[in-house]
Image (tube, helix red, strand yellow):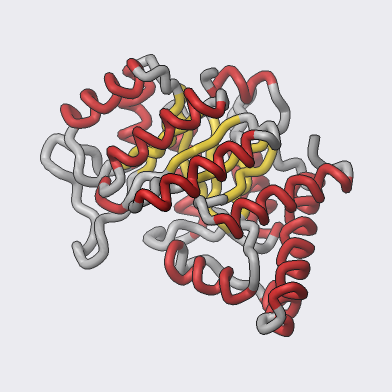
Amino acid sequence: MRLDKLVSARPRTLSIEFSPPRTPTGWTVMKSAIRQLADLGPDFMTVTYGAGGTTRDGTREAVGIIHEGANVPAMAHLTCVGSTRDDLRHLLDEYATAGIANLLALRGDPPAGAGPFRPLPGGFAHARDLIEFLVADGRFAVGCAAFPERHPEAQTREADWDNLIAKFRAGACLALTQMFFDAADYVALTRYLAARARPGETFRVVPGIYPAFTWPDLVKFVAKYSPSTSLPPRLRAALEPVADDPLAGRKACLRYMADLCSDLLAAGAPGLHLYAMNSTNKTNAVAELVTGLRLRGVLE
């Protein structure tokens, strides 16, 4: 199902994100995670695209597993890095042939050590240009990324949020945010967008949540995947004291993330996007978080 149609029919969505494995064992774990989390009834699942397009084939295979094996709408991440328009046209044909109708358009990051991002000749310099290209193709619903704390390369968060508005106006039907740990950052973003919306215009921004397993797990994950993300004092105060106690740390993490999700939904968030990223621990954390939120009555 195309997500532009799905989100127009559902005021709230639940979605889950995976990353393409790099080993045979990793593929086995991911397939098990997809089956387990599909039982939660997510509205769609997404698959990341490695820096520099390094997981292009893996992303395509993983979205196929979700689409065909789990019977859940799949969204493939797609970046500007390392691809020309012709490269992307071939990939779009492959996705369309496989029945994949949803893409998340990102500028993307170059591989580690490659220096600052530079588009290839015949490629795209900005996510909004890629969005326009995908929308013009006509076969896909297109999403984009949002940054409650601002993109690390943006001069100000307001400049970054203005760029988000441009991505929506280029044709994105929803935005999935980078992880964050303070609901106030999300509220500030959505209020900024609402104040600048044209008559009849809405911007659907779904908060991205990393359901950390323990404090060390959280610190390691943020340092690796999103070093510009803040770890607010309230988060540190809740989790760091139990960092050496796996059971207490797990409970504290889930309690913090459940409170964060509850606050976001109460503030009007149109759903939740949860980062599972394949590991057994993270899969279990996602399942426990969703179950707990449903018991609270804040999530359908």
Q: Quadrant of the C terminus?
A: top right
Left or right placement of residue 244 versus residue 25 in this view: right
Residue displayed at 79% across by 40% down:
299
Specify whether 163 is left or right of 34.
Answer: left
Q: Nearer the viewer, residue 118 or 17?
A: 17
Q: Nearer the viewer, residue 215 or 273?
A: 215
Looking at the picture, how far across and down is residue 235, in whole percent? 70, 72
Residue drawn at the location 71% of the way across and 76% of the way down: 239
| Residue 155 appears in the picture as rendered | no
- Compared to residue 178, the image places residue 3 above or below, namely above
Residue at 70%, 24% (x, y): give it.
10
Vertical comparison of 153 with 23: above or below: below
Report whether 177 appears left or right of 9.
Answer: left
95 vs 273, left or right, is left
Residue 283 can be seen, yes or no:
yes
Residue 296: horizontal and vertical position, in percent?
88, 47
Quarter-of-image position of residue 230: bottom right
Residue 40, horizontal then vertical, whole percent: 70, 37
Quadrant placement of the N terminus: top right
